[in-house]
Image: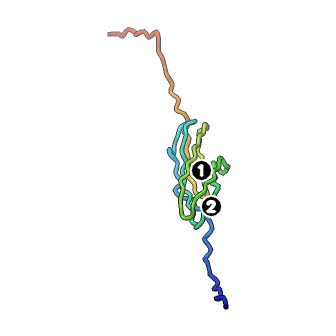
């Protein structure tokens, strides 16, 4: 008995994991020294299979921290980073080509004046 010929099947390979960053936000945009700001970003896997991606947060072009995230194909994940700065100034924050500015304001100094032993001078009425 002859076996039926096998017909080759053509399977379309699944699109590999590929990641896109979007929705970079900083809350608050302006803070005082030593306060904290939350930097959030959404990472989407535009591929069809699960993959792991390293998300890197840079301040003024220098890597501050990174986080690995594993995302199923076609899914998104929102990540948050906490940033603290003690030096006043403007900081450029970037993640995967997205950027925003964080402002650390100089502390407001208040001057207190005190007057003591105040005497009223006589007026010439």
Judged from this view, the residue extending furthest toward the bottom is: 1
Where is mark 1, residue-wise? Answer: 93
Q: Quadrant of the C terminus?
A: top left
Q: From the viewer's perspective, is 113 left or right of 90?
A: left
| Disc 1, SS | strand
**Badge 2 density bin: few <14, some 14–19, many ≥20, Cα 10 Å:** some
Q: Nearer the viewer, mark 2 or mark 1?
A: 2
Which label sits on residue 68?
A: none
Whether residues under marks 2 and 1 lie with C-beta atoms below 8 angstroms apart, the answer is no
Residue 68 image position (x, y, % from top left): 63, 53
- Residue depicted at 63% across the width and 48% down the height: 59
- Residue depicted at 58% across the width and 67% down the height: 48
Judged from this view, the residue extending furthest toward the left is: 125
Residue 51 image position (x, y, % from top left): 62, 61
Q: Quadrant of residue 44?
A: bottom right
- Residue depicted at 64% across the width and 84% down the height: 8
Q: Quadrant of the N terminus?
A: bottom right
Q: CA distance from mark 2 to mark 1?
A: 25 Å
The one nearer the camera, 86 or 49, is 49
Where is mark 2, residue-wise? Answer: 51
Q: From the viewer's perspective, is 17 left or right of 24?
A: right
- Going from N to C along the chain, the mark reached first, 2 or 1, is 2
The one nearer the camera, 29 or 107, is 29
Judged from this view, the residue extending furthest toward the front is: 1
Q: Quadrant of residue 106?
A: top right
The one nearer the camera, 11 or 114, is 11
């Amino acid at each position: 008995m002859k076996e039926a010929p096998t017909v080759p099947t053509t399977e379309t390979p699944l699109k590999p994991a590929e990641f896109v960053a979007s929705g970079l936000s900083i809350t608050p945009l302006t803070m005082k020294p030593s306060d904290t700001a939350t930097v959030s970003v959404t990472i989407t896997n535009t591929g069809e299979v699960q993959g792991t991606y390293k998300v890197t947060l840079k301040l003024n072009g220098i890597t501050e921290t990174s986080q690995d995230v594993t995302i199923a194909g076609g899914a998104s994940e929102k990540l948050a980073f906490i940033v603290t700065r003690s030096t006043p100034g403007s900081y450029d924050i970037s993640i995967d080509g997205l950027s925003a500015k964080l402002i650390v304001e100089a502390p407001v100094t208040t001057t207190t004046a005190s007057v003591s032993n105040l005497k009223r001078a006589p007026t010439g009425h």
